[in-house]
Amino acid sequence: MLLDASRPEAIEQAARRLADGGLVGLPTETVYGLAADADNASAVRRIFEAKGRPADHPLIVHVAADAPRAAVDHYAREVPAFAERLIAALWPGPLTLILPRRAEVAAVAAGGQDSVGLRCPSHPVAQAVLRAAATHGVHGVAAPSANRFGRVSPTSAAHVMEEFAALADDALLVLDGGACPVGIESTIVDCTRGHPVLLRPGVLTPARLEAIAGQPLRARDGAAPRASGTLESHYAPRAKVRLMDARQLRAAFQVLGEDARHIALYARSPIETARGTPRRRMPEDAEDAARELFAVLRELDATGVRLIWVETPPDGPEWDGVRDRLSRAAA
Ligand code: TXA
Ligand code: MG
């Protein structure tokens, strides 16, 4: 069931659905999430089932912005000083912190980890739902991206409906809040090891995170907990994605000529292709590229091509998130 999120009744209906142990698809500033009450084990199990996600892949718990510290203290055993600084500066916003979990809460959502991922989203619809759900006793809302396991994350309500078309209409309430303004998932920082560790890049640059944390940000290593967003192959459309630089792309399209019709192109540089080639121009600006990335992958995939060739994004740190998602889509 699809509801217009600008109607106040829709927010209340979604909040009640969450409090009753149901599933809600809701917009956040990054991507749409598939939400359930984080403290309701059977509701959370329904998320894993609907996504086809392994039960040991932990979910992020979303908390309301009006009392984020109370919510953090409900789930987290301790909050290191550098994490406090990140919370103060960047919440609400596209940042998830992994913190030591209180043993008695959200065990199913945490996928059995002794930590919990917490995030305070800035999207007004997500916040309205979290606030309304809190009045029904919901402390936090577990929500992975609202896509089936391994697939491209949804940045519109239509994408969510597409992903879960197989669910009965009354099993999923989706709030339509328009297109997500950030477009790629939150930056994840592990705060359980005494120093900040970057588990998943997003739109926040490492330099900015380090300046706020007051500590160097380390790269993930083998000891990092499992995170589906960090699996080598993820975010995959049906078509095969391949990254190439502009020179390689030009040469390949030239050699193939009319035979390249089963190939779609997403590039910043001008590249000559046969007429009718499905193509989209990649924006010059990294934030613009992030915003449209998943929608473009879906759109090109829907043309039925077998291959999507993408021009390798620039090297700058502001492109880390887009580069990361594209290389996983291509893996
Ligand atoms: O922007 C986002 O973060 C979106 C929106 C809906 O908030 N959510 C999202 O969720 O991307 P998901 O489940 O698709 O990705 C969350 C990532 C996963 O890779 C998961 O393994 C990791 O966060 N994660 C969650 N809790 C964790 C924990 N306790 N330890 C390690 N990784 C964790
Ligand atoms: Mg995901």
Image: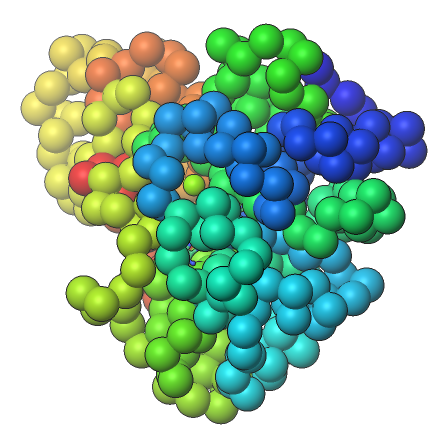
Q: Residue at x 56, y 24 (%)?
A: 160
In this figure, what is the number of numbered marks? 0
- Percent x, y for residue 166? 49, 10
Indicate left or right for 39 with 111 as reference.
right
Question: Looking at the image, which residue sits at the far front?
Answer: 104
Question: Can you give x and y, in whole percent of width and height, for residue 175 in the image?
Answer: 72, 28
Q: Residue furthest bottom?
A: 214
Say how the picture is coloured.
rainbow
Residue 153: image location, x then y, percent: 46, 35
Can you tell which quarter of the image residue 224 is in? bottom left
Quadrant occupied by the N terminus = top right
Q: Is residue 94 visible?
A: no
Residue nearest the viewer, comparing 255 with 137? 137
Instruction: Name above or below for residue 50 compared with residue 132.
Output: above
Quadrant for ligand 2 reads top left
Q: Quadrant of residue 25?
A: top right
Q: Nearer the viewer, residue 110 or 269?
A: 110
The residue positioned 24% from the left and 32% from the top of the image is 241
Task: Report the residue that reaches farthest toward the left.
Answer: 255
Residue 157 visible in the picture: yes
Above or below, comparing residue 291 to residue 188 in the picture: above
Query: Picture coordinates of residue 283 (x, y %)?
Result: 47, 45
Q: The C terminus appears in which quarter of the rendering?
A: top left
Q: Residue at x 17, y 26 (%)?
A: 253
User: Residue drawn 80% across and 32% down?
Assistant: 16
Out of 292 and 282, give the one closest to the viewer.
292
**Residue 228 to residue 303: above or below:** below
Q: Is residue 142 left or right of residue 174?
A: left
Q: Is residue 41 toward the left or the right of residue 6 in the image?
A: left
* Nearer to the camera, 15 or 306: 15
